[in-house]
Image (cartoon, helix red, strand yellow):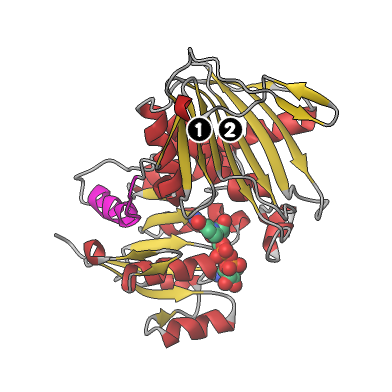
């Protein structure tokens, strides 16, 4: 099996994450990643316009190229990873493909679908593999909800709510700026809308979205998007950056139960109905009224279970990428799926601008 050498353009937060994953394996959050499967891949160098990131490269024993040109002209480099601000993805990806390199690009692939099409065309023309790092397809919380959905563990599922909440506004310099491709639809929508498309089969008929501008006027610092799939499932995707109390990461409603996942750690539970026939409502009396409808169920009619946790390994991404170069596999993150997601993000922005639902597919 062939060994591959990779170089990174943009050794910032995420560029360095890739270096660490590939060269060292690491503990990310609550998970230790064993990178044994990636032994035939090595990050050998990088280029960044910031001197402290060049210094970081040297500290980790990889070549700090003097320029992009020098990096791209190095015949030893097979794969180039692009991990710079979003507006630079298109020119840098095309340049690397034209230099004869296979290319991995950070998400969002591009600023819009027109740019993405040019990048896909360039990879076809160059005959080189181009993949987008949609890494949150490997999130275990998402894969757990996907299993619940596919195996109908709550009966037929009619609504899925997927939220990521923070309270720090938009971090970083370039993420606040429209010209650099800032905003939360491109930054986080790219993950949670993609997860919806990967999970639920069939067309998305309708998209209704609103954007928030609480801490930032030029780009969205949060959004709400409701997708109606042709099988009737409604998927709510919500990102907030001014939320000092978080709502659960996932809330899943089926005919026979509800599942909830609190956060990225995957903590949560499933509650299922055991006996619909039993009329167990003990009315709840409040100071100003009474309700039977909203009365909690009694213990004997429901059952609480642990989540059917699905484990994953992000090393799949690079292993698959190398297998595709070897001609043995198809891309797990296909260009078609990335394009569909890009067009969905455009529909979200279009709906928010119009202030009404828009058709999608
Ligand atoms: P960052 O600001 O930490 O890093 C960007 C780096 O690019 C910086 O070091 C900067 O100096 C460098 N840079 C800027 N212009 C350059 C140029 N012309 N040539 C070379 N280097 C240049 O940002 P980040 O958080 O690492 O984000 C980078 C990319 O990764 C973005 O596209 C972002 O959306 C993506 N990202 C993906 C994930 C994920 O989970 N997949 C997470 C975070 C960021």
Q: Is residue 218 left or right of residue 105?
A: right
Mark 2 near ligand 1 (CB under 8 Å)?
no
Label 1, secondary structure: give it: helix
Which residue occupies 45% across, 46% down?
141
**In this orientation, which residue lies closer to the viewer: 177 or 155?**
155
The part of the image, by quadrant, that contains residue 335 is top left
Query: Over which residues does the magenta segment extend?
Result: 310-325
What residue is pinned by disc 1?
340
Residue 7 visible in image: no
Looking at the image, residue 359 lies above or below residue 264: above
Classify mark 1 as within 8 Å of ligand 1 or not, answering yes or no: no
Q: Quadrant of ligand 1?
A: bottom right
Horizontal relation, residue 357 to residue 111: left or right: right
Q: Does the magenta stretch include residue 312?
A: yes
Q: Name the residue under label 2.
A: 344
> Residue at (40%, 48%) from the top-left corner?
140
In the rendered image, which quarter is residue 286 located in? top right
- Residue at 44 percent of width and 59 percent of height: 96
* Residue 259 higher or lower than 141, as above or below: above
In this view of the protein, which residue sits in the foreground, 160 or 321?
160
Secondary structure of the residue carrying numbered label 2: helix
Residue at 48%, 58% in the rendered image:
95
* Helix, strand or loop for the magenta stretch, by majority: helix
């Amino acid at each position: 099996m062939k060994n591959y050498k990779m170089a990174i353009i943009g050794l910032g937060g995420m560029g360095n994450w890739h270096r660490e994953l590939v060269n060292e394996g690491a503990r990310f959050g609550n998970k230790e990643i064993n990178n044994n499967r990636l032994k035939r891949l090595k990050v050998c160098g990088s280029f960044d316009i910031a001197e402290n990131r060049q210094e970081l490269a040297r500290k980790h024993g990889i070549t700090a190229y003097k320029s992009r040109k020098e990096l791209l002209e190095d015949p030893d480099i097979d794969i180039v990873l692009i991990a710079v601000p979003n507006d630079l993805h298109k020119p840098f990806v095309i340049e690397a493909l034209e230099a004869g390199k296979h290319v991995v690009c950070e998400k969002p692939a591009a600023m819009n679908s027109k740019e993405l099409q040019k990048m896909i065309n360039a990879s076809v023309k160059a005959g080189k593999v181009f993949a987008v790092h949609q890494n949150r397809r490997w999130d275990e919380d998402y894969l757990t909800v996907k299993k619940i959905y596919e195996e109908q563990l709550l009966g037929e599922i009619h609504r899925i709510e997927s939220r990521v909440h923070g309270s720090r506004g938009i971090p970083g310099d370039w993420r606040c700026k429209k010209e650099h491709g800032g905003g939360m639809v491109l930054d986080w929508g790219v993950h949670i809308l993609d997860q919806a498309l990967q999970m639920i089969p069939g067309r998305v008929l309708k998209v209704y979205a609103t954007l928030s501008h609480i801490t930032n006027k030029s780009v969205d610092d949060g959004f709400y998007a409701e997708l109606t799939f042709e099988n009737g499932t409604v998927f709510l995707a919500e990102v907030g950056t001014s939320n000092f109390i978080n709502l659960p990461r996932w809330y899943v409603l089926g005919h026979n139960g509800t599942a909830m996942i609190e956060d990225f750690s995957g903590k949560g539970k499933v509650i299922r109905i055991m006996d619909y026939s039993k009329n167990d409502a003990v009315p709840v009396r409040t100071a100003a009224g009474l309700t039977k409808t909203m009365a909690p169920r009694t213990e004997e009619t429901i059952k609480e279970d642990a989540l059917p946790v699905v484990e994953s390994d992000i090393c799949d991404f690079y292993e698959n990428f190398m297998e595709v170069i070897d001609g043995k596999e198809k891309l797990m993150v296909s260009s078609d799926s990335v394009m569909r997601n890009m067009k969905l993000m455009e529909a979200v922005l279009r709906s928010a601008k119009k202030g009404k639902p828009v058709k999608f597919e």
